[in-house]
Image: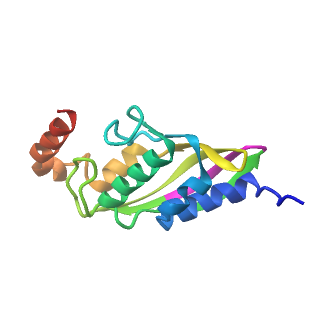
Amino acid sequence: MAAATPSPERIASEYLADVWNERAYAEIPDLVSESFVMYDPVAPADPVPGPRGEVHGPDGLETFIRGVVRGFPDFEVTVRRMFSDDEVVVYVGELGMSHEGTFYGIPPTGRRAEVRYMGLIRVADGMVEEHRVYPPMLAIAEQLGFTSLDVVPYLPRLAWGLLTQRL
């Protein structure tokens, strides 16, 4: 008798806990499909596979997470509520992160952000096929100091980082 496929909620929970929080990169191929796409407004077009705002495939996901963790070593997702309907899982989460390293050209501010956000994970054939995140970008930017005069000293380095990424 074949083993029962775990519920979409369980797969989504394992994906968020193991891949994002535990950084269990070796588990990505077991949890994420080859055709995986993540839609995240902060995903850069390079070096992450996919256009800006998208992450494609298991390798792209690992590259993206490693970039996030480089900038925010304590990055953590806490799921507060989770609902599913067949293959779609919707959740309310909290993000906690301290900007201690360079994040895709943005120098560290040393500030911390904690926000609630919405996410959607689509599971097909026992694998995460799609992940969409809807973070409150303005709240994150404000908490990290990107909307205040605190960021002015970083503007030349930020501009140089963005320029060199495009070259």
Main secondary-structure element of the magenta-colored stretch: strand
Which residue shows up at 45% across the image and 48% down it? 59
Compared across the picture, whether 25 is left or right of 120 comes to: left
Q: Position of residue 19 (x, y in %)?
A: 52, 60
* Residue range of the region highlighted in magenta in the rendering: 86-94
Screen quadrant of the N terminus:
bottom right
Q: Magenta stretch: residue 91 in it?
A: yes
Return the residue nearer the eye: 58 or 102: 58
Q: Is residue 51 visible?
A: yes
Whole-percent x and y of residue 145? Answer: 26, 53
Vertical arrangement, residue 139 with respect to residue 25, above or below? above
Q: Residue at x 34, y 39 (%)?
A: 44
Residue at coordinates 32% horizontally, 50% vertically from top-left? 142
Tell me which colouring the rendered structure shows: rainbow
- State left or right for residue 94 relative to residue 71: right
- In-image side of 121 versus 108 (left or right): right
Q: Using the rendered image of the protein, determine whether residue 77 is visible from the camera's viewpoint.
A: no
